[in-house]
Amino acid sequence: MTENPKHLLDGVSESPHRPSKIAKTAAQNLSNDEEEQQEAPMGPSPRTQRYLVAIEYIGTRFSGSQQQPNFRTVVGVLEEAFHKFIGQPVSIVCSSRTDAGVHALSNVCHVDIQRISKRKPGEVLPPHEQTVVRRAVNHFLQKNEGDIMVIDVRCVPADFHARFKAQERTYFYRLLSGPEPLSTFERDRAWHVPEELDILAMQEACKILVGHHDFSSFRAAGCQAKSPIRTLDELTVSEVVSTPYFPSIVERRQNNLIMEDLHASSNKSESDLPVSSISIGNGASGFNGEASLGFGIRRRHRCFVVRLLVGVLKAVGTGNLTISDVERILNAKSVTAASPMAPPCGLYLGHVKYDLP
């Protein structure tokens, strides 16, 4: 799915130049990211290097991202790995607080490290290289459960705050639609909806919710945002290839024929090409597979990627709610008017955008 980086696309977003986006997602949490920005704490010692660290993790293995006594959390595991690396405790600040069960393709945090000589205790050495930090921390993370990994590290100024400097936060929600039992590989990675979903109706419902509204009907019970009024610039439902995806033999043959046509017509203009060589297959049939797949080949679900408000959109897709119902729920400004929330396992923090120095 292609996104326009100029737009604040996904609900839990903050910007110093415009109202922050809707705080409510279908997975109960993430409203904490919509709290009013507070003054960032004082920076570290001049001899300390601040690192911006991007991480990915399987949310169902953690009791949320924030540190909690007696629970395994993202920050807790990450702080333990850094402690083993540098030999002293650290404090990690995440850009986004995710609830238990919510995954991250890229969450971002910052950590301050003072490199102390192991041979001469008390002697401060030059900061570690970014690649050294990533490799070393991943070494200790992989010796643990292997369900969290550092994907990028960047040296930043001492006053660069992972949370308060964030300009956009992009979230995705995956629904798998179809009567087939959920694949083992998709367990705890998506919300399985046995009913077929009407994507056109869901897209129409999105239009009702876009804009500047009071989103009280969609706030989580524990929402800490001071105001439910948010601006939602874009809300979409897209059908994509379900994963893990490997092309069937029929699809491979079709693709080979297409590539042969393209190769044979490489010296022709696009207007001269046959339709089959510029139209790469039928998306709908590709998602659902063919009726005669062969023994032992699983039928694929239809996979939908949704941004925000998933519970209501799913109800529209199954026909339990109409477009007018969505408008009624929005205008009710009461959380009791909305549909049940979607489970957190389908929610992914996709990206946190910064204006890096």
Image (tube, rainbow, N blue to C red):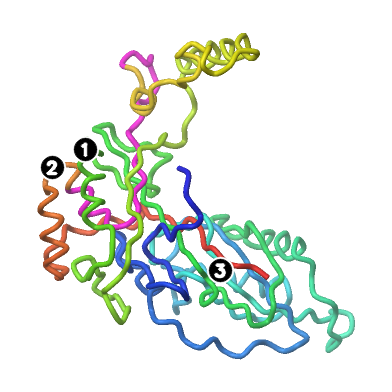
Decide whether residue 296 is among the magenta residues: yes
According to the picture, the residue beneath numbered tag 2 turns out to be 319
* Percent x, y of residue 2: 48, 44
| In-image side of 237 versus 104 (left or right) | left
Name the residue at 21% across, 71% down.
216
| In-image side of 207 versus 187 (left or right) | left
Name the residue at 17% across, 63% down.
330
Dot 1 and dot 2 residues touching (CB under 8 Å): yes
Please state, as top left, top right, bottom left or bottom right, where the N terminus lies in the image.
Answer: top left
The kind of residue tagged 3 is Val
Q: Secondary structure at mark 2?
A: loop
Q: Quadrant of residue 83?
A: bottom right
Name the residue at 41% across, 72% down.
18
253 or 211, nearer to the observer: 211
According to the picture, the residue beneath numbered tag 1 turns out to be 198
- Of badges 1 and 3, the one in the foreground is 1
Closer to the N terminus: mark 1 or mark 3? Answer: 3
According to the picture, the residue beneath numbered tag 3 turns out to be 77
* Percent x, y of residue 5: 51, 55
Q: Looking at the image, can residue 253 be seen?
A: yes
- Name above or below for residue 344 compared with residue 63: above
The kind of residue tagged 2 is Gly
The kind of residue tagged 1 is Asp
Task: Report, in whole angstroms, how far the alpha carbon at label 1 lies from the one at label 2.
Answer: 8 Å
Closer to the N terminus: mark 3 or mark 2? Answer: 3
The magenta-colored residue range is: 291-315
Task: Report, in whole angstroms, how far the alpha carbon at label 3 lies from the one at label 2.
Answer: 43 Å
